[in-house]
């Protein structure tokens, strides 16, 4: 990616690509950003036709549209390899699956230009530079800072495209473990509620109901959860993501009034435990290997700091049951 301003900047583009998809046309018009980066900007409402935000990457163009895009803040330096230890759970000639710690950011952004997963990956696999975009080499999906667990990285463009197709078709299975506030009822359910950028707080996401002024910016989002254990004031659950929206589990659980423990953005501002993260862990990932299309399922155990919270809850429950 070429050097850009460290401040967001509006760029005007004329798209003379009749019949082409919006995201593909934008990539051809300004190839410094990858197609995935353009898709994210579209999702965030930062691609506009006049005053109207274009929120569908699949929108077919008539040709000659004058588009205004707000480009993101980017650190004006190249991504550099860093010798950061990685917990690699699987690796072959096509992909790497890493168990990311909660305090690691996936790729560089505002305030995080070093020490990211992207920096560490480039040190482990120098050939990854340029795969999927210079600032996010080989990274197909993401986990928030504060979320630990499994993330897959492609080693070359063919593997990247193979994985992108799987994510687009929703054949990749992602399961998370979470501790939420309160006793969740019913014990298992599907939360089907569209998610979009919060209209009042742009750094947050929110459930956006249909037929509201901002509903066109929302995208479908489905999360299935099931209860694993119930405590006096908390519920331990497994979540299965059917879509991959930003902050999806955190937003959905807050929407049903059971926010994720430790989530000071969507839940309680004061922490109940000595936990400097939220209780959310991507514990299981199932995908098809690009080499042979065979299913691959990997698991990452709950981190020690989260296991300690469950142990504390179990101990307190035992004291109540056996005074």
Image (cartoon, rainbow, N blue to C red):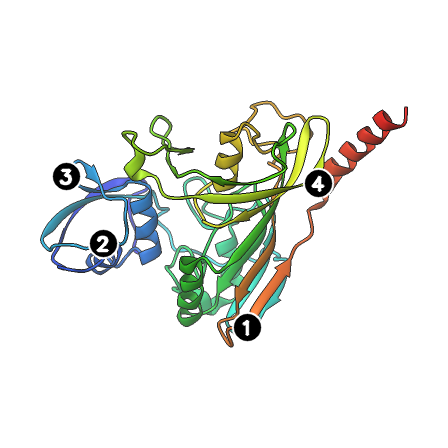
Near mark 3 (Cα within 10 A), the count class, few <14, some 14-19 or many ≥20, is few
**Is 102 in front, or is 75?**
102
| Element at label 4 | helix
Residue at 41% in and 40% down: 110
Residue 102: image x %, image y %? 59, 44
Please name the residue that numbered disc 1 is placed on.
294
43 left or right of 16 in image: right
Residue 273: image x %, image y %? 69, 29
Please name the residue that numbered disc 4 is placed on.
305
Which tag, 4 or 1, sits closer to the chain's start?
1
Q: Nearer the viewer, mark 3 or mark 4?
A: 3
Near mark 1 (Cα within 10 A), the count class, few <14, some 14-19 or many ≥20, is few
Residue at 90% in and 27% down: 322
84 left or right of 191 in image: right
| Element at label 1 | loop
Please name the residue that numbered disc 3 is placed on.
50
Residue at 11% in and 55% down: 63
What's the mark number on residue 22? 2
């Amino acid at each position: 990616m070429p050097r850009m301003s460290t401040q967001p900047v509006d760029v005007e583009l004329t798209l003379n690509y009749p019949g082409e998809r919006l995201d593909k046309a934008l990539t051809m018009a300004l190839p410094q950003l990858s197609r995935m980066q353009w898709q994210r900007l579209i999702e965030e409402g930062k691609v506009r036709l006049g005053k109207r935000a274009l929120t569908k990457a699949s929108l077919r163009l008539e040709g000659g549209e004058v588009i205004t895009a707000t480009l993101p803040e980017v650190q004006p330096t190249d991504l550099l390899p860093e010798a950061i230890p990685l917990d690699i759970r699987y690796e072959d000639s096509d992909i790497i699956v890493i168990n990311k710690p909660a305090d690691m950011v996936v790729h560089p952004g505002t305030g995080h230009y070093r020490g990211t997963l992207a920096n560490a990956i480039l040190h482990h696999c120098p050939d990854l530079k340029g795969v999927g975009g210079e600032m996010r080499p080989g990274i197909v999906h993401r986990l928030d800072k504060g979320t630990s667990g499994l993330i897959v990285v492609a080693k070359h463009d063919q593997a990247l495209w193979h994985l992108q197709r799987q994510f687009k078709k929703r054949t990749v299975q992602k399961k998370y473990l979470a501790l939420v506030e309160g006793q969740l009822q019913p014990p298992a359910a599907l939360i089907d509620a569209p998610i979009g950028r919060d209209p009042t707080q742009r750094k947050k996401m929110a459930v956006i109901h249909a037929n509201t002024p901002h509903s066109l910016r929302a995208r479908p989002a489905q999360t299935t959860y099931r209860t694993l254990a119930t405590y006096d004031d908390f519920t331990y659950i497994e979540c299965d993501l059917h879509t991959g929206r930003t902050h999806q589990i955190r937003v959905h659980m807050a929407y049903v009034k059971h926010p994720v423990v430790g989530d000071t953005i969507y839940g309680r501002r004061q922490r109940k435990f000595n936990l400097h993260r939220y209780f959310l862990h991507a514990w299981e990932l199932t995908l098809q290997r690009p080499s042979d299309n065979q299913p691959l399922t990997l698991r990452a155990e709950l981190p020690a700091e989260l296991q300690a919270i469950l142990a504390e809850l179990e101990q307190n429950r035992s004291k109540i049951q056996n005074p």
